[in-house]
Amino acid sequence: MTTTETRTSPEKPTITVGIGAASSGPVQIVALVERTLRDRWRSLLVWSLGLVGISAVQLAVYPSVASTAAGWQSMVDQWPQALREAFHLEAYTTGPGFLNTELFSMMFPLVLTAVALGAAAAATAGEEERGTADLLLSLPVTRGRVIAAKTIAMVLGVAVVAGAGTVTVVVGSPLVNLSVGTVDVLAAGLMTSLLGLLFGAFGLLLGVLTGHRAAVLGGGIALAIAAFLLNALAPLASWLEPWQKVSPFYWALHSDSLLHGVDWAMAGLMSGVALLLLAAAARVFHRRDISSR
Amino acid sequence: MGRESVPALRMRGLTKYYGDQCGVEDLDLEVRSGEVFGFLGPNGAGKTTTIRMLLGLIYPTRGEAWILGTELASDAAGIRARVGYLPGDLALYDRMLGEELLAFLARMRGGIDPARYRSLAERLELDLSRRISDLSRGNRQKIGVVQSFMHRPRLLILDEPTSGLDPLVQLEFRRLVREAAADGATVFLSSHVLTEVEQMADRVGIVNEGRLVMVDTVDGLREKATKRVELDFPGRPPTVLASAPGVRALEIHGDTAVCTVAGPVGALLAVAVGHGVLDVHTHDPDLEDAFLSYVSEGTP
Protein backbone atom coordinates (compact mmCIF):
# COMPACT_ATOMS: atom_id res chain seq x y z
CA MET A 1 0.00 0.00 0.00
CA THR A 2 1.35 3.39 -0.86
CA THR A 3 0.19 6.75 0.24
CA THR A 4 -1.05 8.99 -2.47
CA GLU A 5 -0.77 12.15 -0.48
CA THR A 6 -0.73 15.04 -2.89
CA ARG A 7 -0.94 18.33 -1.16
CA THR A 8 -1.21 20.91 -3.83
CA SER A 9 -3.06 23.56 -1.93
CA PRO A 10 -0.87 26.24 -0.45
CA GLU A 11 -1.21 25.58 3.23
CA LYS A 12 0.83 26.22 6.26
CA PRO A 13 3.40 23.51 6.70
CA THR A 14 1.60 21.58 9.39
CA ILE A 15 3.71 18.56 10.11
CA THR A 16 1.10 16.00 10.78
CA VAL A 17 -1.40 16.32 7.96
CA GLY A 18 0.81 14.87 5.32
CA ILE A 19 1.65 11.68 7.15
CA GLY A 20 -0.22 8.91 5.45
CA ALA A 21 -1.22 5.61 6.96
CA ALA A 22 1.48 3.54 5.34
CA SER A 23 4.44 5.57 6.49
CA SER A 24 3.66 5.14 10.16
CA GLY A 25 2.66 1.45 10.08
CA PRO A 26 5.27 0.01 12.47
CA VAL A 27 4.87 2.99 14.79
CA GLN A 28 1.13 2.39 14.88
CA ILE A 29 1.57 -1.29 15.65
CA VAL A 30 4.05 -0.57 18.45
CA ALA A 31 1.77 2.10 19.90
CA LEU A 32 -1.23 -0.20 19.79
CA VAL A 33 0.65 -3.17 21.28
CA GLU A 34 1.85 -0.95 24.09
CA ARG A 35 -1.63 0.37 24.76
CA THR A 36 -3.14 -3.11 24.74
CA LEU A 37 -0.53 -4.48 27.14
CA ARG A 38 -1.03 -1.54 29.48
CA ASP A 39 -4.68 -2.41 29.58
CA ARG A 40 -3.89 -6.02 30.36
CA TRP A 41 -0.88 -5.87 32.65
CA ARG A 42 -2.87 -6.43 35.82
CA SER A 43 -4.44 -9.56 34.40
CA LEU A 44 -1.05 -10.76 33.14
CA LEU A 45 0.50 -10.15 36.54
CA VAL A 46 -2.19 -12.17 38.28
CA TRP A 47 -1.88 -15.08 35.84
CA SER A 48 1.92 -15.00 36.14
CA LEU A 49 1.79 -15.05 39.93
CA GLY A 50 -0.76 -17.85 39.74
CA LEU A 51 1.38 -20.01 37.50
CA VAL A 52 4.49 -19.28 39.56
CA GLY A 53 2.57 -20.24 42.71
CA ILE A 54 1.19 -23.46 41.25
CA SER A 55 4.62 -24.43 39.94
CA ALA A 56 6.27 -23.70 43.27
CA VAL A 57 3.72 -25.74 45.20
CA GLN A 58 4.07 -28.70 42.84
CA LEU A 59 7.84 -28.56 43.09
CA ALA A 60 7.58 -28.47 46.87
CA VAL A 61 5.58 -31.69 46.80
CA TYR A 62 8.11 -33.50 44.60
CA PRO A 63 10.55 -34.68 47.33
CA SER A 64 7.81 -36.66 49.08
CA VAL A 65 6.66 -38.19 45.78
CA ALA A 66 10.22 -39.16 44.91
CA SER A 67 10.71 -40.80 48.31
CA THR A 68 7.71 -43.08 47.76
CA ALA A 69 8.80 -43.96 44.25
CA ALA A 70 8.94 -47.73 44.79
CA GLY A 71 5.50 -47.96 46.36
CA TRP A 72 4.00 -45.72 43.70
CA GLN A 73 5.43 -47.78 40.89
CA SER A 74 3.99 -51.03 42.19
CA MET A 75 0.61 -49.38 42.60
CA VAL A 76 0.62 -47.92 39.10
CA ASP A 77 1.63 -51.25 37.64
CA GLN A 78 -1.72 -52.69 38.67
CA TRP A 79 -3.75 -50.05 36.82
CA PRO A 80 -4.95 -50.57 33.25
CA GLN A 81 -2.35 -49.68 30.71
CA ALA A 82 -4.64 -47.21 28.95
CA LEU A 83 -5.11 -45.25 32.12
CA ARG A 84 -1.40 -45.24 32.77
CA GLU A 85 -0.77 -43.89 29.31
CA ALA A 86 -3.53 -41.33 29.48
CA PHE A 87 -2.12 -39.71 32.54
CA HIS A 88 1.53 -40.43 31.99
CA LEU A 89 1.66 -42.34 35.23
CA GLU A 90 4.43 -44.68 34.17
CA ALA A 91 7.11 -42.17 34.78
CA TYR A 92 5.35 -40.21 37.50
CA THR A 93 8.17 -40.44 40.00
CA THR A 94 10.86 -39.34 37.57
CA GLY A 95 11.51 -35.60 37.36
CA PRO A 96 10.20 -35.07 33.83
CA GLY A 97 7.32 -37.48 34.42
CA PHE A 98 6.26 -35.64 37.54
CA LEU A 99 6.45 -32.23 35.88
CA ASN A 100 4.59 -33.55 32.91
CA THR A 101 1.69 -34.90 34.93
CA GLU A 102 1.45 -32.11 37.45
CA LEU A 103 2.20 -29.04 35.34
CA PHE A 104 2.73 -29.37 31.65
CA SER A 105 -0.07 -31.67 30.56
CA MET A 106 -2.78 -29.60 32.22
CA MET A 107 -1.92 -26.57 34.33
CA PHE A 108 0.32 -24.84 31.81
CA PRO A 109 -2.04 -25.45 28.86
CA LEU A 110 -5.00 -24.35 30.96
CA VAL A 111 -3.45 -21.13 32.21
CA LEU A 112 -1.84 -20.18 28.90
CA THR A 113 -5.08 -20.87 27.03
CA ALA A 114 -6.91 -18.65 29.51
CA VAL A 115 -4.37 -15.86 29.02
CA ALA A 116 -4.59 -16.13 25.24
CA LEU A 117 -8.39 -16.23 25.25
CA GLY A 118 -8.54 -13.24 27.57
CA ALA A 119 -6.37 -11.30 25.15
CA ALA A 120 -8.43 -12.53 22.20
CA ALA A 121 -11.68 -11.49 23.85
CA ALA A 122 -10.37 -8.01 24.60
CA ALA A 123 -8.83 -7.65 21.15
CA THR A 124 -11.67 -6.74 18.84
CA ALA A 125 -14.81 -7.93 20.62
CA GLY A 126 -13.82 -5.98 23.72
CA GLU A 127 -13.22 -2.81 21.72
CA GLU A 128 -16.55 -3.23 19.99
CA GLU A 129 -18.51 -3.96 23.13
CA ARG A 130 -17.00 -1.01 24.96
CA GLY A 131 -17.59 1.17 21.92
CA THR A 132 -13.94 2.20 21.63
CA ALA A 133 -13.66 0.49 18.25
CA ASP A 134 -15.16 3.59 16.61
CA LEU A 135 -12.39 5.78 17.96
CA LEU A 136 -9.63 3.28 17.23
CA LEU A 137 -10.76 2.53 13.69
CA SER A 138 -11.31 6.18 12.86
CA LEU A 139 -7.53 6.53 13.05
CA PRO A 140 -5.49 6.14 9.88
CA VAL A 141 -4.87 2.50 10.69
CA THR A 142 -5.96 -0.48 8.64
CA ARG A 143 -7.90 -3.23 10.33
CA GLY A 144 -5.18 -5.68 9.34
CA ARG A 145 -2.72 -3.70 11.44
CA VAL A 146 -5.12 -3.72 14.36
CA ILE A 147 -5.33 -7.52 14.16
CA ALA A 148 -1.54 -7.71 13.85
CA ALA A 149 -1.01 -5.52 16.90
CA LYS A 150 -3.59 -7.39 18.96
CA THR A 151 -1.96 -10.68 17.96
CA ILE A 152 1.48 -9.44 18.98
CA ALA A 153 0.08 -8.29 22.31
CA MET A 154 -1.49 -11.72 22.80
CA VAL A 155 1.78 -13.49 22.00
CA LEU A 156 3.72 -11.26 24.38
CA GLY A 157 1.16 -11.78 27.13
CA VAL A 158 1.34 -15.56 26.80
CA ALA A 159 5.14 -15.38 26.63
CA VAL A 160 5.30 -13.40 29.86
CA VAL A 161 3.10 -15.83 31.79
CA ALA A 162 4.74 -18.92 30.28
CA GLY A 163 8.13 -17.39 30.97
CA ALA A 164 7.28 -16.80 34.62
CA GLY A 165 6.14 -20.41 34.98
CA THR A 166 9.07 -22.02 33.18
CA VAL A 167 11.63 -19.91 35.00
CA THR A 168 10.08 -21.01 38.28
CA VAL A 169 10.44 -24.65 37.23
CA VAL A 170 14.00 -24.16 35.95
CA VAL A 171 15.10 -22.35 39.09
CA GLY A 172 13.11 -24.50 41.50
CA SER A 173 13.91 -27.98 40.20
CA PRO A 174 17.51 -28.17 41.52
CA LEU A 175 16.30 -26.98 44.90
CA VAL A 176 14.12 -30.09 45.28
CA ASN A 177 16.59 -32.43 43.55
CA LEU A 178 14.35 -32.79 40.54
CA SER A 179 16.52 -33.52 37.55
CA VAL A 180 15.24 -32.18 34.27
CA GLY A 181 17.01 -30.47 31.36
CA THR A 182 16.65 -26.70 31.34
CA VAL A 183 16.28 -26.68 27.59
CA ASP A 184 13.58 -29.33 27.87
CA VAL A 185 11.59 -27.25 30.35
CA LEU A 186 11.82 -24.28 28.01
CA ALA A 187 10.73 -26.57 25.19
CA ALA A 188 7.68 -27.67 27.15
CA GLY A 189 6.95 -24.01 27.92
CA LEU A 190 7.14 -23.24 24.21
CA MET A 191 4.92 -26.14 23.17
CA THR A 192 2.24 -25.28 25.73
CA SER A 193 2.48 -21.58 24.78
CA LEU A 194 1.86 -22.46 21.16
CA LEU A 195 -1.10 -24.56 22.27
CA GLY A 196 -2.54 -21.59 24.18
CA LEU A 197 -1.91 -19.28 21.25
CA LEU A 198 -3.63 -21.68 18.90
CA PHE A 199 -6.81 -21.44 20.99
CA GLY A 200 -6.23 -17.69 21.25
CA ALA A 201 -6.12 -17.40 17.47
CA PHE A 202 -9.35 -19.36 17.30
CA GLY A 203 -10.80 -16.96 19.88
CA LEU A 204 -9.73 -13.97 17.84
CA LEU A 205 -11.54 -15.40 14.84
CA LEU A 206 -14.66 -15.90 16.97
CA GLY A 207 -14.28 -12.31 18.15
CA VAL A 208 -14.28 -10.82 14.66
CA LEU A 209 -17.11 -13.12 13.62
CA THR A 210 -19.40 -12.25 16.51
CA GLY A 211 -18.14 -9.05 18.14
CA HIS A 212 -18.89 -10.51 21.55
CA ARG A 213 -16.44 -11.32 24.32
CA ALA A 214 -18.71 -14.03 25.70
CA ALA A 215 -18.55 -15.86 22.37
CA VAL A 216 -14.76 -15.72 22.38
CA LEU A 217 -14.43 -17.04 25.92
CA GLY A 218 -17.25 -19.57 25.66
CA GLY A 219 -16.29 -20.91 22.25
CA GLY A 220 -12.58 -20.92 23.03
CA ILE A 221 -12.95 -22.69 26.36
CA ALA A 222 -15.37 -25.21 24.86
CA LEU A 223 -12.93 -26.05 22.08
CA ALA A 224 -10.01 -26.30 24.50
CA ILE A 225 -11.89 -28.64 26.82
CA ALA A 226 -13.05 -30.79 23.91
CA ALA A 227 -9.48 -31.00 22.63
CA PHE A 228 -8.17 -31.84 26.09
CA LEU A 229 -10.72 -34.59 26.67
CA LEU A 230 -10.21 -36.02 23.21
CA ASN A 231 -6.48 -36.30 23.81
CA ALA A 232 -6.84 -37.65 27.34
CA LEU A 233 -9.63 -40.13 26.70
CA ALA A 234 -8.73 -41.38 23.25
CA PRO A 235 -6.41 -44.10 24.56
CA LEU A 236 -9.28 -45.45 26.68
CA ALA A 237 -11.77 -46.01 23.86
CA SER A 238 -10.88 -47.71 20.62
CA TRP A 239 -13.49 -45.79 18.61
CA LEU A 240 -12.02 -42.51 19.80
CA GLU A 241 -8.41 -43.41 19.33
CA PRO A 242 -8.03 -42.50 15.63
CA TRP A 243 -9.28 -39.01 16.43
CA GLN A 244 -6.66 -38.30 19.04
CA LYS A 245 -4.30 -36.95 16.43
CA VAL A 246 -6.60 -34.07 15.53
CA SER A 247 -6.47 -32.73 19.08
CA PRO A 248 -4.11 -29.77 19.50
CA PHE A 249 -3.33 -31.18 22.93
CA TYR A 250 -1.90 -34.20 21.16
CA TRP A 251 0.19 -31.92 18.96
CA ALA A 252 1.56 -30.09 21.96
CA LEU A 253 2.05 -32.94 24.41
CA HIS A 254 2.53 -36.20 22.60
CA SER A 255 6.22 -35.77 21.87
CA ASP A 256 7.04 -35.31 25.57
CA SER A 257 9.08 -32.15 25.31
CA LEU A 258 10.39 -32.60 28.83
CA LEU A 259 12.36 -35.59 27.60
CA HIS A 260 12.90 -34.85 23.95
CA GLY A 261 12.88 -31.09 23.57
CA VAL A 262 10.87 -29.19 20.98
CA ASP A 263 9.04 -31.25 18.39
CA TRP A 264 9.56 -28.84 15.54
CA ALA A 265 7.08 -30.53 13.25
CA MET A 266 4.32 -30.17 15.82
CA ALA A 267 5.43 -26.66 16.75
CA GLY A 268 5.24 -25.81 13.06
CA LEU A 269 1.82 -27.40 12.76
CA MET A 270 0.44 -25.41 15.70
CA SER A 271 1.97 -22.17 14.44
CA GLY A 272 0.68 -22.83 10.95
CA VAL A 273 -2.87 -23.50 12.05
CA ALA A 274 -2.76 -20.43 14.33
CA LEU A 275 -1.55 -18.26 11.46
CA LEU A 276 -4.31 -19.58 9.20
CA LEU A 277 -6.89 -18.73 11.85
CA LEU A 278 -5.39 -15.25 12.24
CA ALA A 279 -5.37 -14.68 8.50
CA ALA A 280 -9.03 -15.69 8.41
CA ALA A 281 -9.72 -13.32 11.30
CA ALA A 282 -8.01 -10.42 9.52
CA ARG A 283 -9.98 -11.16 6.38
CA VAL A 284 -13.31 -11.35 8.16
CA PHE A 285 -12.57 -8.23 10.19
CA HIS A 286 -11.63 -6.28 7.10
CA ARG A 287 -14.97 -6.85 5.44
CA ARG A 288 -17.18 -6.53 8.47
CA ASP A 289 -19.32 -3.69 9.78
CA ILE A 290 -18.13 -2.50 13.15
CA SER A 291 -21.02 -2.65 15.58
CA SER A 292 -21.96 0.46 17.46
CA ARG A 293 -23.17 0.28 21.01
CA MET B 1 -5.70 20.98 -10.49
CA GLY B 2 -6.82 23.10 -7.60
CA ARG B 3 -8.02 21.13 -4.64
CA GLU B 4 -10.66 23.78 -4.07
CA SER B 5 -12.61 22.59 -7.09
CA VAL B 6 -12.89 19.07 -5.67
CA PRO B 7 -15.77 18.68 -3.24
CA ALA B 8 -14.57 17.75 0.24
CA LEU B 9 -17.30 15.19 0.45
CA ARG B 10 -19.33 13.59 -2.24
CA MET B 11 -21.86 10.82 -1.89
CA ARG B 12 -23.58 9.17 -4.80
CA GLY B 13 -26.45 6.80 -4.19
CA LEU B 14 -25.00 5.96 -0.81
CA THR B 15 -27.21 3.30 0.72
CA LYS B 16 -27.06 1.17 3.81
CA TYR B 17 -29.57 -1.44 4.76
CA TYR B 18 -29.20 -3.50 7.84
CA GLY B 19 -31.72 -5.98 8.97
CA ASP B 20 -34.83 -4.13 9.97
CA GLN B 21 -32.96 -1.14 11.38
CA CYS B 22 -33.30 2.22 9.73
CA GLY B 23 -30.39 2.71 7.39
CA VAL B 24 -30.03 5.31 4.69
CA GLU B 25 -31.15 5.20 1.10
CA ASP B 26 -29.74 6.80 -2.04
CA LEU B 27 -27.96 9.71 -0.47
CA ASP B 28 -26.66 12.16 -3.04
CA LEU B 29 -24.81 15.02 -1.49
CA GLU B 30 -21.87 17.25 -2.16
CA VAL B 31 -20.13 19.28 0.49
CA ARG B 32 -17.84 21.95 -0.89
CA SER B 33 -14.32 22.34 0.24
CA GLY B 34 -14.08 24.88 3.06
CA GLU B 35 -17.76 24.77 3.83
CA VAL B 36 -19.43 24.18 7.19
CA PHE B 37 -22.28 21.81 6.53
CA GLY B 38 -24.99 20.93 9.01
CA PHE B 39 -26.36 17.42 8.66
CA LEU B 40 -29.70 17.50 10.38
CA GLY B 41 -32.35 15.03 11.24
CA PRO B 42 -34.19 13.52 14.14
CA ASN B 43 -32.63 10.71 16.11
CA GLY B 44 -32.62 7.51 14.11
CA ALA B 45 -32.88 9.30 10.76
CA GLY B 46 -29.63 7.81 9.52
CA LYS B 47 -27.09 10.52 10.37
CA THR B 48 -24.79 8.28 12.34
CA THR B 49 -25.12 5.49 9.79
CA THR B 50 -24.03 7.90 7.06
CA ILE B 51 -21.14 9.22 9.09
CA ARG B 52 -19.89 5.78 10.06
CA MET B 53 -19.89 4.82 6.39
CA LEU B 54 -17.78 7.88 5.61
CA LEU B 55 -15.23 6.75 8.21
CA GLY B 56 -15.12 3.23 6.80
CA LEU B 57 -16.50 1.75 10.01
CA ILE B 58 -19.41 0.20 8.15
CA TYR B 59 -19.67 -0.60 4.48
CA PRO B 60 -22.33 0.76 2.14
CA THR B 61 -24.82 -1.71 0.72
CA ARG B 62 -24.41 0.22 -2.51
CA GLY B 63 -23.32 3.61 -3.71
CA GLU B 64 -20.04 5.44 -3.49
CA ALA B 65 -18.41 8.20 -1.57
CA TRP B 66 -15.39 10.38 -2.27
CA ILE B 67 -13.66 12.12 0.56
CA LEU B 68 -11.19 14.91 -0.15
CA GLY B 69 -11.09 13.69 -3.72
CA THR B 70 -10.26 10.07 -2.92
CA GLU B 71 -12.75 7.29 -3.35
CA LEU B 72 -13.55 5.92 0.06
CA ALA B 73 -13.27 2.27 -0.89
CA SER B 74 -9.83 2.76 -2.41
CA ASP B 75 -7.95 3.98 0.65
CA ALA B 76 -10.09 4.43 3.74
CA ALA B 77 -7.12 4.44 6.13
CA GLY B 78 -5.27 7.03 4.07
CA ILE B 79 -8.36 9.21 4.00
CA ARG B 80 -8.73 8.96 7.76
CA ALA B 81 -5.29 10.54 8.18
CA ARG B 82 -6.84 13.76 6.88
CA VAL B 83 -10.16 13.45 8.68
CA GLY B 84 -11.03 14.33 12.25
CA TYR B 85 -13.92 12.36 13.66
CA LEU B 86 -15.99 12.78 16.77
CA PRO B 87 -18.20 9.73 17.31
CA GLY B 88 -21.81 10.33 18.25
CA ASP B 89 -21.69 7.79 21.03
CA LEU B 90 -18.20 8.51 22.25
CA ALA B 91 -16.42 5.77 24.19
CA LEU B 92 -12.88 6.27 25.44
CA TYR B 93 -10.28 4.08 27.08
CA ASP B 94 -11.42 4.64 30.64
CA ARG B 95 -8.28 3.58 32.41
CA MET B 96 -6.06 6.12 30.71
CA LEU B 97 -5.42 9.68 31.72
CA GLY B 98 -6.68 12.30 29.31
CA GLU B 99 -3.13 13.21 28.38
CA GLU B 100 -2.17 9.55 27.82
CA LEU B 101 -5.10 8.95 25.53
CA LEU B 102 -4.37 12.00 23.42
CA ALA B 103 -0.69 11.07 23.26
CA PHE B 104 -1.66 7.60 22.09
CA LEU B 105 -4.02 8.92 19.42
CA ALA B 106 -1.34 11.41 18.36
CA ARG B 107 1.17 8.58 17.94
CA MET B 108 -1.32 6.61 15.90
CA ARG B 109 -1.64 9.66 13.67
CA GLY B 110 2.10 9.88 13.10
CA GLY B 111 2.94 12.35 15.83
CA ILE B 112 1.41 15.63 16.92
CA ASP B 113 3.05 18.32 19.01
CA PRO B 114 1.60 17.92 22.55
CA ALA B 115 1.40 21.71 22.75
CA ARG B 116 -1.33 21.52 20.14
CA TYR B 117 -3.71 19.28 22.09
CA ARG B 118 -2.80 20.88 25.39
CA SER B 119 -3.78 24.29 24.11
CA LEU B 120 -7.05 22.90 22.75
CA ALA B 121 -7.73 21.30 26.13
CA GLU B 122 -6.97 24.58 27.84
CA ARG B 123 -9.41 26.44 25.63
CA LEU B 124 -12.13 23.98 26.55
CA GLU B 125 -11.09 24.05 30.21
CA LEU B 126 -10.35 20.36 30.18
CA ASP B 127 -8.05 18.86 32.80
CA LEU B 128 -5.87 16.30 31.00
CA SER B 129 -4.25 14.98 34.16
CA ARG B 130 -7.38 13.18 35.26
CA ARG B 131 -8.31 9.59 34.63
CA ILE B 132 -10.96 9.33 31.96
CA SER B 133 -13.17 7.12 34.12
CA ASP B 134 -13.34 10.02 36.60
CA LEU B 135 -14.50 12.55 34.04
CA SER B 136 -18.04 13.78 33.61
CA ARG B 137 -19.85 13.20 30.35
CA GLY B 138 -19.18 16.78 29.29
CA ASN B 139 -15.47 16.47 29.96
CA ARG B 140 -15.26 13.22 28.02
CA GLN B 141 -16.96 14.96 25.14
CA LYS B 142 -14.29 17.65 25.36
CA ILE B 143 -11.62 14.97 24.92
CA GLY B 144 -13.55 13.84 21.87
CA VAL B 145 -13.53 17.37 20.51
CA VAL B 146 -9.81 17.84 21.17
CA GLN B 147 -8.83 14.59 19.47
CA SER B 148 -10.90 15.41 16.41
CA PHE B 149 -9.30 18.84 15.95
CA MET B 150 -5.75 18.20 17.11
CA HIS B 151 -4.20 17.04 13.85
CA ARG B 152 -5.65 19.97 11.91
CA PRO B 153 -7.65 17.69 9.61
CA ARG B 154 -8.79 18.87 6.19
CA LEU B 155 -12.23 17.47 6.94
CA LEU B 156 -13.96 17.32 10.29
CA ILE B 157 -16.81 14.87 10.66
CA LEU B 158 -18.54 15.56 13.93
CA ASP B 159 -21.51 13.52 15.07
CA GLU B 160 -23.65 15.52 17.50
CA PRO B 161 -20.54 17.36 18.70
CA THR B 162 -22.14 19.62 21.28
CA SER B 163 -24.06 16.96 23.15
CA GLY B 164 -23.16 17.12 26.80
CA LEU B 165 -21.25 20.39 26.50
CA ASP B 166 -22.40 23.29 28.61
CA PRO B 167 -23.30 26.56 26.84
CA LEU B 168 -19.98 28.31 27.47
CA VAL B 169 -18.03 25.38 26.10
CA GLN B 170 -20.40 25.22 23.14
CA LEU B 171 -19.44 28.80 22.42
CA GLU B 172 -15.76 27.92 22.42
CA PHE B 173 -16.52 24.88 20.28
CA ARG B 174 -18.20 27.12 17.70
CA ARG B 175 -15.09 29.27 17.70
CA LEU B 176 -13.00 26.19 16.98
CA VAL B 177 -15.25 25.29 14.08
CA ARG B 178 -15.02 28.79 12.65
CA GLU B 179 -11.24 28.81 12.99
CA ALA B 180 -10.95 25.45 11.28
CA ALA B 181 -13.16 26.72 8.47
CA ALA B 182 -11.08 29.88 8.22
CA ASP B 183 -8.02 27.67 7.83
CA GLY B 184 -9.70 26.05 4.86
CA ALA B 185 -10.96 22.92 6.53
CA THR B 186 -14.37 21.51 5.73
CA VAL B 187 -16.70 20.77 8.60
CA PHE B 188 -19.53 18.26 8.39
CA LEU B 189 -21.51 18.19 11.60
CA SER B 190 -24.68 16.44 12.52
CA SER B 191 -27.34 17.47 14.94
CA HIS B 192 -30.95 16.79 15.71
CA VAL B 193 -31.57 20.45 16.53
CA LEU B 194 -31.24 23.08 13.87
CA THR B 195 -30.59 25.97 16.22
CA GLU B 196 -27.41 24.23 17.33
CA VAL B 197 -25.85 24.47 13.88
CA GLU B 198 -27.50 27.51 12.34
CA GLN B 199 -24.83 29.87 13.68
CA MET B 200 -22.02 27.74 12.30
CA ALA B 201 -23.31 26.17 9.13
CA ASP B 202 -23.26 27.67 5.66
CA ARG B 203 -25.62 25.06 4.38
CA VAL B 204 -27.73 22.37 5.93
CA GLY B 205 -29.09 19.10 4.69
CA ILE B 206 -32.04 17.50 6.37
CA VAL B 207 -32.29 13.76 6.50
CA ASN B 208 -35.38 11.93 7.59
CA GLU B 209 -36.11 8.23 7.68
CA GLY B 210 -32.93 7.51 5.81
CA ARG B 211 -33.52 9.95 2.98
CA LEU B 212 -32.18 13.40 2.29
CA VAL B 213 -35.27 15.60 2.17
CA MET B 214 -33.66 18.96 1.46
CA VAL B 215 -30.40 20.83 1.15
CA ASP B 216 -30.33 24.59 1.44
CA THR B 217 -28.41 27.48 2.88
CA VAL B 218 -29.33 28.54 6.37
CA ASP B 219 -30.45 31.87 4.91
CA GLY B 220 -32.59 30.08 2.37
CA LEU B 221 -34.15 28.02 5.07
CA ARG B 222 -34.76 31.14 7.10
CA GLU B 223 -36.47 32.80 4.17
CA LYS B 224 -38.75 29.88 3.71
CA ALA B 225 -39.35 29.67 7.40
CA THR B 226 -42.49 31.28 8.70
CA LYS B 227 -42.40 33.94 11.33
CA ARG B 228 -44.96 35.24 13.72
CA VAL B 229 -46.17 38.84 13.52
CA GLU B 230 -48.44 40.21 16.22
CA LEU B 231 -50.50 43.25 15.38
CA ASP B 232 -52.37 45.29 18.01
CA PHE B 233 -55.47 47.13 16.87
CA PRO B 234 -57.71 49.63 18.67
CA GLY B 235 -60.59 47.17 18.32
CA ARG B 236 -61.26 43.82 16.76
CA PRO B 237 -58.60 43.13 14.10
CA PRO B 238 -59.84 42.92 10.50
CA THR B 239 -60.07 39.39 9.12
CA VAL B 240 -58.89 40.71 5.76
CA LEU B 241 -55.36 40.33 7.15
CA ALA B 242 -55.64 36.62 6.38
CA SER B 243 -55.71 37.33 2.67
CA ALA B 244 -52.61 39.54 2.64
CA PRO B 245 -49.78 38.01 0.56
CA GLY B 246 -47.55 35.69 2.55
CA VAL B 247 -49.94 35.14 5.42
CA ARG B 248 -50.36 31.47 6.15
CA ALA B 249 -52.51 31.64 9.22
CA LEU B 250 -54.37 34.19 11.27
CA GLU B 251 -55.44 33.92 14.87
CA ILE B 252 -57.32 36.61 16.69
CA HIS B 253 -57.01 37.07 20.43
CA GLY B 254 -59.05 40.05 21.54
CA ASP B 255 -57.53 43.13 19.93
CA THR B 256 -54.45 41.30 18.75
CA ALA B 257 -53.99 39.49 15.45
CA VAL B 258 -51.33 36.80 15.36
CA CYS B 259 -50.23 36.17 11.78
CA THR B 260 -47.96 33.41 10.59
CA VAL B 261 -46.06 34.81 7.64
CA ALA B 262 -43.73 33.29 5.09
CA GLY B 263 -41.35 35.67 3.32
CA PRO B 264 -41.50 39.49 3.46
CA VAL B 265 -44.02 41.10 5.78
CA GLY B 266 -44.43 44.38 3.86
CA ALA B 267 -47.73 43.50 2.25
CA LEU B 268 -49.25 42.45 5.54
CA LEU B 269 -48.09 45.65 7.23
CA ALA B 270 -49.58 47.74 4.43
CA VAL B 271 -52.96 46.13 5.01
CA ALA B 272 -52.59 46.53 8.77
CA VAL B 273 -51.67 50.21 8.49
CA GLY B 274 -54.81 50.74 6.42
CA HIS B 275 -56.81 49.41 9.35
CA GLY B 276 -55.10 51.60 11.93
CA VAL B 277 -52.68 49.15 13.51
CA LEU B 278 -51.32 50.44 16.84
CA ASP B 279 -48.31 48.27 17.43
CA VAL B 280 -46.31 45.51 15.75
CA HIS B 281 -44.32 42.70 17.37
CA THR B 282 -42.30 40.34 15.21
CA HIS B 283 -40.64 37.17 16.28
CA ASP B 284 -37.57 35.63 14.68
CA PRO B 285 -38.33 33.03 12.12
CA ASP B 286 -38.76 29.82 13.92
CA LEU B 287 -36.21 27.65 12.18
CA GLU B 288 -36.93 24.80 14.47
CA ASP B 289 -40.52 24.76 13.24
CA ALA B 290 -39.31 24.88 9.65
CA PHE B 291 -36.97 22.01 10.36
CA LEU B 292 -39.69 20.03 12.05
CA SER B 293 -42.02 20.62 9.13
CA TYR B 294 -39.48 18.90 6.89
CA VAL B 295 -38.97 15.94 9.10
CA SER B 296 -42.60 15.41 9.97
CA GLU B 297 -43.64 15.09 6.34
CA GLY B 298 -44.87 11.65 5.68
CA THR B 299 -45.00 10.74 9.33
CA PRO B 300 -48.31 10.75 11.14
Image (cartoon, coloured by chain):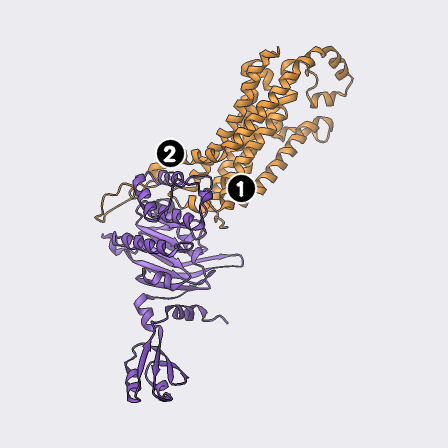
Chain colours: A orange, B purple
Residue in view at x 52 percent, y 43 percent = A125
Residue A221: x %, y % from top left: 61, 36
Q: Chain of mark 1?
A: A
The quadrant holding residue B170 is bottom left
- Rendered view: B282 above or below B179: below
**What amino acid is found at the position of numbered circle 2 in the picture?**
Pro
Give the spatial CA distance, label 1 vs label 2.
24 Å
Residue in view at x 64 percent, y 19 percent = A58
Residue B116: x %, y % from top left: 30, 43
Q: Nearer the viewer, residue B103 or B110?
A: B103
Q: Nearer the viewer, residue B187 or A291?
A: B187
Q: Report which residue position mark 1 lands on.
A: A207
Under circle 2, the secondary element is helix
Q: Earlier in the sequence, mark 1 or mark 2?
A: 2
Under circle 1, the secondary element is helix
Residue in view at x 48 percent, y 29 percent = A156
Q: Are marks 1 and 2 on the same chain?
A: yes
State whether residue B42 appears in this view: yes
Q: Residue furthest right?
A: A78
- Rendered view: A284 above or below A49: below
Residue A208: x %, y % from top left: 51, 43
Residue in view at x 44 percent, y 39 percent = B96
Q: Report which residue position mark 2 lands on.
A: A26
Residue A259: x %, y % from top left: 60, 15
State whether residue A243 appears in this view: no
Q: Which mark is residue A7?
A: none
Q: Nearer the viewer, residue A111 or A39?
A: A39
Question: Do the CB atoms of the residues marked 1 and 2 lie less than 8 Å apart?
Answer: no
Q: Could you tell me how many numbered marks the image carries?
A: 2
Local crowd size for mark 1, using a 10 Å CA cut-off: few (<14), some (14–19), many (≥20)? many
**What amino acid is found at the position of numbered circle 1 in the picture?**
Gly
